[in-house]
Image: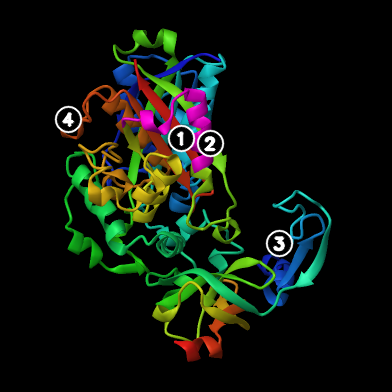
Amino acid sequence: MPSPRYWREVPSRLRLEAARCSGCGKVNYPARAICPGCRGTESEKMTLSKTAKIITSTVIHIAPDDFLFEAPYAIAIVETPEGARFMSQVVDCDPSSVGPGMDVSLEFRLIRKEARSGILCYGFKAVPTASWEARS
Amino acid sequence: MREVAIVAAGMTPFGELWDRSLRQLFADAALEVIEKAGVDHLDAIYVGNMSGGCFVGQEHLGPLMADQIGMAGVPSTRVESACASGGIALRTAYFEVASGASDLVLASGVEKMNDGADVTNVLATAADQELEVYHGITFPGLYAMIARAHMEAYGTTLEDLSWVSVKNHRHGALNPKAQFPREFTLEQVMNSTPVADPLRLLHCSPVSDGGAAVLLCPLDQAKKYTDQPIKILGTGQATSPMALADRKDPAFLDSVQLSAERAFKIAGVGPGDIDVAEVHDCFAISEICCIEALGLVERSQAAGAAASGLTALGGKIPVNTSGGLKSKGHPVGATGIAQVIEIFEQLRSESGARQVQGARLGLAQNMGGSGASSVVHILERM
């Protein structure tokens, strides 16, 4: 990934910045020019909570080259309390234990290393919460 | 708008075709069509192709392919919508003929996936690079998430998914052009190598090379080229949010439902009128989601439709008699045209051991990405 492309994503990817639509209240992550819910153009910048719930998930056994040595790993669509949904790896747990309904916290982690550019790419990964683990 | 017919079809076998290049796959399919129809010219060519650039480093396929069949000079355009490229190439050709702009238009699709490219990464370009692929998702992974959401919401089981593969391989075993024309048992499917939980290898369509083409002309001129023209009764296309996370329900394919509604409206028929269907089973879960969204089966019966025989040859609504993407193969850009060819042949009673007796109305549904684009065509025997 060329460095400007990585740099452009810093607000959403590294700071979890989103936008709440002033028209319909939908939280869009990352922020967009037009709200996909109501086509409104006014929005307020906000930062997402660092907690979420898993909507659906999988465990990748056959991985892309950049993630070859991490397989098998869990990856999920998570939803924050504000209603923003996005994709995130689920780590620090047995991948096969990950599933819909699981409570997670979002932690700042290394996501990948760009083989060609040498850039270290960061972002958020999900970690099952202590209370969830105590339950199971 | 004018009524439009398909008058000839040509298709290479699907598989690992090491002796044929991208351009040759196209030429083989296109020249078969030209010969069958006995035409000496074309007014336009559409080439459905997902990623010639990433798979073999070749873009600008419009002029390249026209030249390969001795038609340099003819307007020729590459159409891209990931795995729905072929179906949308057909739709584009349909409108060119229906509008009256052209009389003889070739709609084709071609993909060369087995030429050394990193297929997992190339296919992932059809997902959202910034929000999905960045985090390490793969295409099987996206459909695995759809599968898990479907299991969670409707109680769909691994056995339900596996029956889709068993059924489609039974159909494909009867198709001489299929990449894997052999049957698998339920146990073999369920115990195959894990790819992305809950999906296993035998729930996934293969990596394939292939080319397919059909010739379109106005219905009132069709008898010049064939005794048995097949009418394109309806066409519909739709999109939905690219990222799976942005869909209302990750277990439901909105674009498939929307594209079907539009095609049915134009055709003036409903899902209950369809005699045979080809749907986009890139993964076993997608066939379940597609037949549900198309309305071919009741939502409550979709998961068990393959196991119960409802969608098998001889069942109430046979689905993927060609073997589907699973058994026949999935050269992504060619798939949409190949699906339509199966329906074309079914409606002309040319399907041999796979024939659905008395089929009059057929449907082909082709999908791009994790369902962000979908296109449906309804064909009618004259």
Q: Quadrant of the N terminus of chain B?
A: top right
Q: Can residue A1 be seen in this snapshot?
A: no
The residue beneath circle 4 is B352
Judge from the rendering whether residue B275 lies leftward or rightward of residue A63; answer left or right: left
Q: Is residue A128 magenta?
A: no
The three-letter amino acid code for the residue at tag 2 is: Gln
Q: Are marks 1 and 2 on the same chain?
A: yes
Q: Earlier in the sequence, mark 1 or mark 2?
A: 2
Q: Which mark is on residue B376?
A: 1
Q: Is residue B258 magenta?
A: yes
Which of these two is toward me, B76 or B172? Answer: B172
Judged from the image, the secondary structure of the residue bearing numbered disc 1 is strand
CB atoms at circles 1 and 4 under 8 Å apart?
Answer: no
User: Pointer 3 indicates a residue of which chain?
Assistant: A
Judge from the rendering whether residue B344 lies leftward or rightward of residue B219; answer left or right: left
Judged from the image, the secondary structure of the residue bearing numbered disc 2 is strand
Judge from the rendering whether residue B192 lies leftward or rightward of residue A99; answer left or right: left
The residue beneath circle 3 is A28
Q: Quadrant of the C terminus of chain B?
A: top left
User: Pointer 2 indicates a residue of which chain?
Assistant: B
CB atoms at circles 1 and 2 under 8 Å apart?
Answer: yes
The residue beneath circle 2 is B237
Which of these two is toward me, B125 or A44? Answer: A44
Please state the extent of the stretch shown in magenta in the rendering.
B257-275
Label 3 and label 4: CA atoms lie apart by 53 Å
Q: Can residue B231 be seen in this snapshot?
A: yes
Label 1 and label 4: CA atoms lie apart by 25 Å
Label 3 and label 2: CA atoms lie apart by 26 Å
Label 1 and label 3: CA atoms lie apart by 31 Å
Label 1 and label 2: CA atoms lie apart by 6 Å
User: Pointer 1 indicates a residue of which chain?
Assistant: B
